Image (cartoon, rainbow, N blue to C red):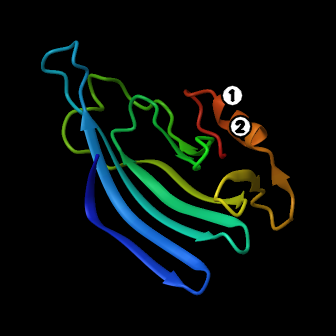
Amino acid sequence: MVFTTGFGIFKDGSDKNYSFKTSYAGANPLTPGAPNIDVESNFYINENKEKGFLQVIGSLVGDNFPSTEAFISDPSGQSVFLGIGFYEGSPFTSLFGKNERQISEFNVLIKIDKDGNFEGIYKNDGSDKIYSIEEWNARFENADPHKKNKK
């Protein structure tokens, strides 16, 4: 993975903000001459341990084949899905050249403890309801990679 723009950190009171863009590419080493699978990301992260939240806003663009996923992990190693892409195209038509197909956009508000460990995900409906980590991740783990549906 390569940072394509500088990694930025700035603090505003009890808020810590991070922003960065990355890109990565890789080919199947068992298939000589295979084209790279390309993905570019754009992230903005706002952390406030005093208020107990971590907001992650971002997007992924690239080949969008095969399916792509984004997740974040807390200090304890627990992971939360941010977004997923779905199969589009084929290895013969989708991987050559630099593609900027929309893969995923996300805006996730995660409840955290004082150490930054994940406790749940706020529903994005204006309520105070919270998904457990297992409930949230199941929405992505159970998604059909061939059918786009909003997450």
Q: Which mark is residue 84?
A: none
Up the image or down, 39 lies above or below 58; here it is above
- Is disc 2 placed on a helix, strand or loop? helix
In this view, the residue in front, 119 or 151, is 119
Residue occupying image coordinates x 43% and y 32%: 88
Compute the Cα span from label 1 to label 2: 6 Å
- Crowd band around label 1 with a 10 angstrom C-alpha radius: few (<14), some (14–19), many (20+): few
- Residue 33 locus on image (x, y percent): 12, 20
Q: Looking at numbered disc 2 in the image, what kind of residue is underneath it? A: Arg
Give x and y (percent) for residue 134. Answer: 75, 37
Q: Mark 1 is on which residue type?
A: Asn
Q: Where is residue 133 in the image (x, y as percent from the top left)?
A: 74, 43
Question: Could you tell me if the residues under marks 1 and 2 are in contact, i.e. CB atoms within 8 Å?
Answer: yes
Quadrant in which residue 66 is drawn = top left
Q: Residue at x 28, y 43 (%)?
A: 24
Q: Mark 2 points at which residue?
A: 139
Q: Mark 1 points at which residue?
A: 142
Instruction: Please give left or right for residue 32 compared with residue 23 in the image.
Output: left
User: Pointer 2: residues within 10 angstroms few (<14), some, or many (20+)?
Assistant: few
Q: What residue is rendered at 61% in x and 65% in y?
A: 55
Q: In the depicted view, which residue is nearer to us: 20 or 123?
A: 20
Count of all numbered marks drawn on residues in the image? 2
